Image (cartoon, rainbow, N blue to C red):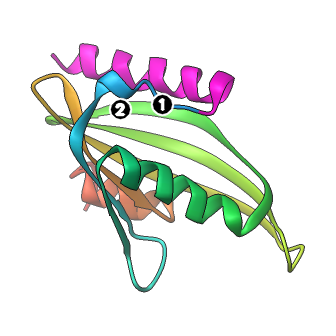
Amino acid sequence: MSQENIDVIRRGFEHFEATGEPIWEDFAETIEIRDHQSPDQGYYVGHAGWKRWIDDWSAAWTEWSIEVEDIREAGDSVLVLIHHTAQGSSSGLDLDSHDGMLYGFRDGKVVTVDYYTGREHALEAAGLVG
């Protein structure tokens, strides 16, 4: 099952890079997204919540990209380690960060996404360190 989950995530990143859209059938209708990078920890629910999360993030940056560096099994979850770059829309600030996204699965669908600033936080949340 874990290799299947890894394949879902890998295929999803490739599709998103090509189209700007996820493969919706791989996401549960009630997906929960928790963005741990901000002090108020953004929380989004459902497909509309996923879209709002991306829109909220995109609004702050003129350009941004995510490069997948590693995908790892983490129990019933999949951890994706990413290199994230962006440029601030009003500040011009350059972001160059190595972060992590932890995807939780149930019945072959993604049910949770947790975004962590800093690889160490993601590894700890996945139970792969500490």
Q: Which mark identifies residue 72?
A: 2
Camera-side residue: 105 or 97?
105
**Residue under the image location 15 percent in, 36 percent down:** 75
Q: Position of residue 35 (x, y in %)?
A: 41, 65
Number of residues whose C-alpha sits closer than 10 Å to that of mark 2, classed few (under 14), some (14–19) or many (20 or more): some
**Residue under the image location 55 percent in, 32 percent down:** 21
Q: Position of residue 9 (x, y in %)?
A: 40, 26
Q: Is residue 59 above or below residue 47?
A: below
> Which residue is situated farthest in the right direction here?
92
Q: Is residue 3 above or below residue 37?
A: above
What's the distance in space between the residues labelled 2 and 1, CA to CA? 20 Å
**Residue under the image location 43 percent in, 24 percent down:** 23
Q: Is residue 80 magenta?
A: no
Image quadrant containing the N terminus: top left
Q: Is residue 5 left or right of residue 47?
A: left
Image quadrant containing the C terminus: bottom left
Q: Could you tell me the amino acid type at mark 1?
A: Pro
Q: Could you say whether the residue bearing mark 2 is in a helix, strand or loop?
A: strand
Magenta stretch in the rendered image? 1-20
Camera-side residue: 9 or 48?
48
Q: Position of residue 46 (x, y in %)?
A: 29, 49
Q: Is residue 114 above or below residue 69?
A: below
Number of residues whose C-alpha sits closer than 10 Å to that of mark 1, classed few (under 14), some (14–19) or many (20 or more): many
Q: Is residue 12 magenta?
A: yes
* Residue 116, quarter of picture: bottom left
Q: Could you say whether the residue bearing mark 1 is in a helix, strand or loop?
A: loop
> Magenta residues: mostly which secondary structure?
helix
Per the image, the residue denoted by label 1 is 22
